[in-house]
Image: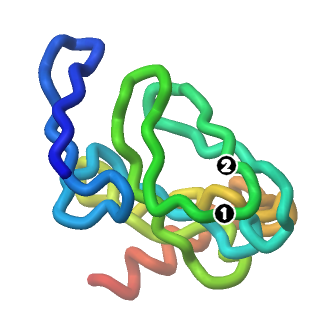
Amino acid sequence: MNVVQSSKSGRPKELHDLSLGKDRHFDLYTFVAEYGIRTREPFPLHCNCGSIVTIMPPFQEQFVMCPNCESSIKIIVLEGDPGYIIGRNHDGEPMLIPVQGSSKIALALTQEEKERMLRDVKEKIK
């Protein structure tokens, strides 16, 4: 099933197989903690535009559409309650990316702890 959806910018977006997310292009990707899903509580999924998509239990989505900017967001579930993953910014420097749905405890790193982790990563990838 192919669906063409008009975005707010006026550009058409072609979506393929909306039920399974197969063979489709995603505008954004986000990481979600298994912890956030297991709590069986709704949790906010933040889009890059600042809008929020509320994920309701039972979790069944493989992707969601942002109601504000109409971006398609692929959801990648990570085991446990990781808090952060390590990625790279636009300059190629390591950065900590918060994992959505993580517990407040997993996300409660001090600025000093975050900086130390990034220093350690930089040393290991040299």
Residue 42: image location, x then y, percent: 79, 50
Compute the Cα span from label 2 to label 1.
Answer: 7 Å
- Horizontal arrangement in the rendering, residue 5 relative to residue 62 (left or right): left
Q: Which residue is mark 2?
A: 55
Residue 98: image location, x then y, percent: 59, 57
Binning the other alpha carbons within 10 Å of mark 1 as few (below 14), some (14 to 19) or many (20 upward) gives few
Q: Which residue type does callout 2 highlight?
A: Ile
The disc at residue 59 is: 1
Which picture quadrant has residue 121?
bottom left
Q: Are marks 2 and 1 in contact (CB under 8 Å)?
A: yes
Residue sitting at 54 percent across and 72 percent down? 77
The disc at residue 51 is: none
Which picture quadrant has residue 71?
top left
29 versus 2 height, above or below: below
Q: Label 2's element?
A: strand
Residue sitting at 39 percent across and 23 percent down? 69
- Horizontal arrangement in the rendering, residue 29 relative to residue 99 (left or right): left
Q: Which residue type does callout 1 highlight?
A: Phe
